């Protein structure tokens, strides 16, 4: 008996260590299995309120990360909307299985110009993220441009504030088509030309993408009519469009991939060849 | 004097837990690298003090960090482990005489400090990540985490020791 007692006293550190270490391991293993009441967690009152206090201070620091999460969420929702537009058949939770005609990616703008005449943006994604040339680029507020150069990790976007840019757009109300160009004067105002003379236009009308190209889906927001005038030859109208987007502070953008684009382009090419 | 020592250690305990969970756990350098400063408590706990008490306090210390980081008992296990092996590490870092001389870490030369702090940090991180990752498929992540977190932790701990030493 005395022997045993001495053994315990002599090895008390080791035994204490083994005991506490086993408890720790037990807690660890317990935390790995789901549906079990866990003892060690941060949802109890003391630690919960401590974190609550902390969060009220530090939530600002994680804004960046939160933004990314929200963008991913938006991405998902956009895809779903597109899916519901096409057919109302059944509900899918997993966005990977949705047969939308459009895929959405998101990227971050790492360089942006708006003071030149041929403006471009650079984003932090490229072919590694399955982007390709001629994808449409938008933000949650409206249109940004089209991908025109691409490397493995980065891509440049031809901004709508580029004199080479010519995008199909229409009046949302009357569905009259025109081309969207930029006269290089103001980075927040673009021009819509070739609107038929008889098209009814009022100041404040919404302009959206036309859906006649394979790049942008129909109905992406662009801006509102600021003012308009007849062209010299009285055949069409010339509209100044106030953009919804602030092109000077873009950060997170979405890219739109039309899955059927190649098919449509090939088909149109065949017809041209026949002509 | 003794009361003062107890008070200092309690204050250090609380302060280190708060700094660890509020500040250092949020760093996530390159996505996964965090320093674990709280083991400084175990590292600079008085060398001649009761060893059983240290093991128990280390368990509490790790458990507190676990509570805040929802990690089961991994910090507790790692802390208890280094508290237990501390006498051996002290022996090979500072020589057999550490028990009889009341040495202060900050007064020792840098090589000995680095060996001592480095070994403690390494053993702690080894147990910590072994329990946390716990998967052979992520062996590379395991090695990466140990390596980079250890470097990060060692640098911070040595800085703190140097900064707060009373010379």
Image: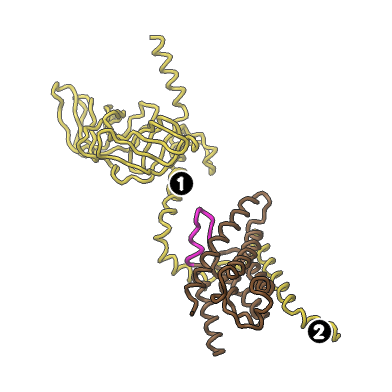
Which chain does yellow denote in the image? A
Quadrant in the picture for residue A24: bottom right
Q: Is residue A91 visible?
A: no
Residue B84 on the magenta segment: no
Residue A267 point in image, percent of width and height? 44, 18
Q: Could you say whether the residue bearing mark 2 is in a helix, strand or loop?
A: helix
Work out which residue is located at the far left of the displayed protein and give it.
A232
Instruction: Provide the residue span drawn in magenta.
Output: B22-34
Chain letter of disc 1?
Answer: A
Which mark is on residue A72? Answer: 1
Sequence order check, earlier mark of 2 and 1? 2
Instruction: Report the residue marked by disc 2.
Output: A6
* Residue depicted at x 41% and y 9%: A274
**Which chain is in brown here?**
B
Q: In this view, does A136 lie to the left or right of B157?
A: left
**Separation of residues labelled 2 and 1 (CA atoms):** 63 Å
Q: Is mark 1 on a helix, strand or loop?
A: helix
Closest to the camera, between mark 2 and mark 1, is: 2
Report x, y in % for residue B124: 63, 65
- Residue A250 is situated, as x and y percent measured from the top left of the image, at 33, 44
């Amino acid at each position: 008996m005395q022997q045993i007692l001495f053994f315990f006293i002599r090895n008390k550190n080791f035994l204490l260590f083994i005991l506490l270490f086993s408890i720790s391991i037990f807690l660890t293993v317990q935390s790995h299995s789901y549906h079990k009441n866990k003892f060690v967690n941060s949802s109890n009152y003391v630690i919960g309120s401590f974190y609550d206090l902390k969060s009220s201070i530090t939530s600002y620091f994680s804004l960046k990360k939160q933004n990314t999460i929200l963008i991913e969420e938006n991405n998902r929702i956009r895809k779903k909307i597109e899916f519901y537009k096409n057919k109302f058949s059944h509900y899918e939770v997993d966005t990977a299985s949705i047969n939308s005609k459009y895929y959405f990616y998101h990227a971050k703008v790492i360089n942006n110009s708006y003071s030149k005449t041929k403006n471009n943006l650079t984003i932090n994604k490229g072919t590694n993220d399955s982007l390709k040339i001629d994808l449409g680029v938008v933000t949650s507020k409206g249109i940004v441009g089209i991908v025109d150069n691409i490397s493995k990790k980065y891509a440049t976007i031809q901004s709508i504030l580029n004199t080479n840019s010519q995008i199909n757009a229409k009046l949302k109300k009357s569905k009259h088509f025109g081309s969207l160009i930029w006269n290089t004067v103001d980075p927040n105002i673009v021009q819509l030309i070739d609107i038929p003379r008889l098209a009814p236009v009022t100041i404040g009308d919404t302009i959206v993408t036309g859906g006649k190209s394979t790049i942008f889906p129909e109905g992406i927001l662009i801006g509102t009519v600021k003012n308009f005038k007849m062209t010299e030859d009285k055949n069409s109208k010339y509209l100044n469009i106030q953009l919804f987007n602030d092109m000077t502070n873009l950060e997170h953008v979405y890219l739109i991939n039309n899955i059927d684009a190649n098919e449509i382009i090939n088909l149109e090419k065949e017809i041209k060849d026949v002509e | 004097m003794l009361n003062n020592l107890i008070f200092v250690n309690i204050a250090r305990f609380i302060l280190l837990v708060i700094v660890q969970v509020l500040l250092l756990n949020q760093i996530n350098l390159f996505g996964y690298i965090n320093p674990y400063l709280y083991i400084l408590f175990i590292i600079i706990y008085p060398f001649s003090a009761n060893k059983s008490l240290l093991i128990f306090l280390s368990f509490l210390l790790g458990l507190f960090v676990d509570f805040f980081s929802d990690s089961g008992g991994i910090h507790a296990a790692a802390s208890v482990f280094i508290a237990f092996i501390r006498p051996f590490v002290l022996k090979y870092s500072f020589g057999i005489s550490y028990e009889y001389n009341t040495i202060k870490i900050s007064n020792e030369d840098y090589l000995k400090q680095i060996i001592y702090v480095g070994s403690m940090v390494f053993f702690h991180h080894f147990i910590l990540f072994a329990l946390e990752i716990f998967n052979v498929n992520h062996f590379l992540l395991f090695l990466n985490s140990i390596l980079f977190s250890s470097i990060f932790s060692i640098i911070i701990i040595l800085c703190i020791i140097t900064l707060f030493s009373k010379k």
